[in-house]
Amino acid sequence: MTHRGSKLIILCTLLLLLAQPVWAATAQPERTVLTLELLQERLQLPTNRDGIPTLDLRQMAIDLRPENAEFRDSFYQLLRTQLQRAGSNPLGLDLSFSLIRGDFVGSELGLRTPLYGQSLAPIFTPTQQEQIQRDYARQTLRQRRSLAQFKEPHSFLSPTLAAPSQITVFRGPLKLEQTHFMGSVNFANTFFLQPVAAQGTIFNQEADWTETRFSSGASWAGATFRRAASFRGSIFFAKAEFNQAQFQDGAIFSDSTFGDIANFVQASFKQVANFSRVQWLGNADFSQVRYSSQVLFAKDRFNQTFSLTEATFEQAVAFREAQFNQSVNLLGTSIQGIADFSDVEFAKDAVLNVAGLTFDSDKTKILGNPGQIGRVMRVPTLQGNENVLRNLVQNFRALQQIADANQLEYVTQRLRRSELQRHLLGININTASPKLLVQLGFSATQAAAIAEYRNQQSFRNLTELMTLEDIDLETYLQISDRIVAGEALSVPEWLLEGLHWLGLSLLLLLSQYGTSFWLVFAVGMVTFAYFGVLFWLVDRWRRVLPQRIVPTLQETIWVLSSFGCLSLFGLVTIFRIAEQPWLTIGSLATVVLPIPVFLLLRLYQKGRYHDLMDISYLVEDGSMRQLRLLIGRLPVMPRFQLFRERYMPLLWHRKWNWLNYFDFSLNNLLKLGFNDIRLRDEHLPGTISSLAWYQWSLGLLYITLLLWTLSRTIPGLNLLFYLK
């Protein structure tokens, strides 16, 4: 053989070794052919493993094919007799590194015993008996639900419902580490009282673990299922590990129960994975799992956290009618098909963390109940997630789920406001002195490291802090919300950023960034009622001396009662809809209180000494009475003489006159009213005119906000503005 040829052989050998999975990286040992004589010898001399006597059949080549029927029958008989023998110490079975040809029926090796009934077998410990009772209650509830679907309530009383059933009990531990099963494997309807270890096991044919119960831990880490694997109806009372397992055919886990942690990290599913109606009582970790085909989580119940971090869904995934009692982590998840969250129930504090979620908005669809799915989606920061939120908004707009799209835009702007606030008030680590850095929470060593780093180059973002050896994660998390990185803002830039923050804050508090029509309506109602009372007070309560010009008691009661009812309705709506109702009310107060109150105090401080004191400041167009849209109307009557002939002062002494003040307020704010009511142009104090013009200016802003909100919340009009 030439030197070049030997190099080629070595290279090919290395490539083959590198191509092996992690669990098969170790060299496979030579196997001994198992004969009846060798089997009997091993059965007579169990090996002590972890304090438990174990039948050692490691590194064996076991032939259970039909053509070797005599050996196969003897194999099962001898093993069954030995494993089922009486005694306080159960025997374990170790088939690690063995090669098993033919079908392996593991359910024939255990002890057949009634699982349910009045008396349980004495082989079960109190803990296991409690597990069985919980399992029995679960089975009963499932049967009742099934019968209820067929509307046969009389069947609930059927005596066959609680009939005891037989199950195979495997008392000792089972080890199948890197065992290679050439045929099918059947452990259906088996109760394992001790741990099951099947790390790196290869199943060439079907693996049937249907209705199997695992009292202790069970692990299939790194196992390979080349044909269908069925765990349907199985119960994992302890931790279950499927990390790095490969399911090359269908995987069925429907109707199963995971009582503890379920670990599927880095597993792969080539065909359909069915996890329907599964109970996840502990944490379910599916991080970095790859699904090449459809996957079903329909009607599942997740009691603890459900992690799909960096998982990949190449086709559809369905969570229909699932229940999430804790948060779902979709951090860095890639969705390439349809993700269906229809009729999903989320607990009060449960959210969908979609930070770093990757999907093509043109091909992928994320479905969910309108008005619900958008409210549970969260991202921790805007940085790095703007494209995610933009794609989600586009997804829901294409589905005409406007409420969900608006909710995500609202979340986006809230995060943007937080970033602006941090830029305005945070300490810039590029300009802060070492003393100030220590006051923030950095140690002297960390402050010196920051100063040394920025002498060479400025920090462009906060994540660069983690590149310094002296900065630990705990310190970074404690201080990151109080510091900023980048160039320092000049005074004009700071003022512009401040105005941007103020305007954005008002939009968020008063309208939820144009996503809540009823919040805008409630704000307008409170404002309209407030200014209506102000104009009534200014016009009717003029002076007490020397001549009383005050409203009647009946009119005062009507005005204050109407103001109270309107304001109460608006405030109740604000408290029901706004996420921060007190801040919303405070923001509204900063807009409508200071200037009007100042003008009112100034008016009563100066007093009123002018002609036409006993005539209303307000005049109405007496030529017609109708509902009018007064967009172009100004609050003060023009001086043209012909107009004065059409406008007449309000009738003070009519019982219904107080309605005119609310009508005038409605005209100024909403540009809509029943009468064209304006201020007169003669003997009018400038303070009163300023008050009317101020409300009219607010009305322009309010109409703009209202129309903008309507354009974002009405589906048809929304499509006209936002769809490309």
Image (cartoon, rainbow, N blue to C red):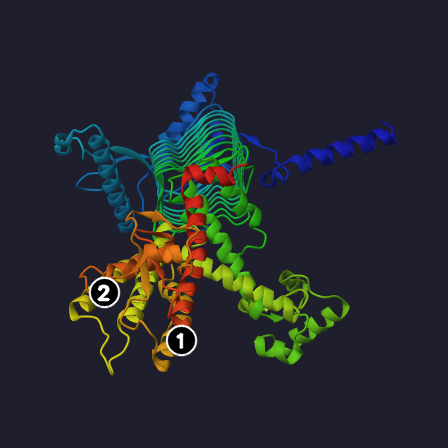
Instruction: Give the SS element for disc 1.
Output: helix
Q: Using the image, determine if residue 634 lies above or below residue 204.
A: below
Q: Quadrant of the N terminus?
A: top right
At x 26%, y 58%, the residue is 569
Q: Which residue is mark 2?
A: 652
Q: Tell me which numbered mark, 2 or 1, is placed earlier along the sequence.
A: 1
* Residue position marked by numbered label 1 in the rendering: 598
* Disc 2 versus disc 1: nearer the observer: 2
Q: Say what amino acid the circle numbered 1 marks.
A: Phe
Q: What is the x, y in percent for residue 500?
A: 55, 61
Q: Is residue 721 above or below residue 411?
A: above
Pinpoint residue 657: horizontal percent, then vertical percent: 23, 61
**Foreground residue, 64 or 105?**
105
Comparing 346 with 86, the one in front is 346
- Quadrant in which residue 649 is drawn: bottom left
Q: Is residue 598 visible?
A: yes
Q: Would residue 94 be found to the left or right of residue 666 on screen?
A: right
Farthest residue, direction top? 67
| Residue at 23% over, 65% down | 652
Can residue 574 be seen in the rendering of this structure?
Answer: no
Q: Where's the C terminus, which quadrant? A: top right
Q: Residues within 10 Å of mark 2 (few under 14, many from 20)?
A: some
Q: Going by the image, does 543 lie left or right of 324?
A: left
Q: Amino acid at mark 2?
A: Trp
User: Within 10 angstroms of label 1, few (less than 14), some, or many (20 or more) residues?
Assistant: few
Residue 566 sits above or below residue 483 on the image: above
SS state under label 2? loop
Choose top left, top right, bottom left or bottom right for residue 78: top left
Please report the residue visible at 58 percent of the width from the left and 64 percent of the height from the top.
497
Measured Cα–Cα span from mark 2 to mark 1: 26 Å
Front residue of 591 and 547: 547
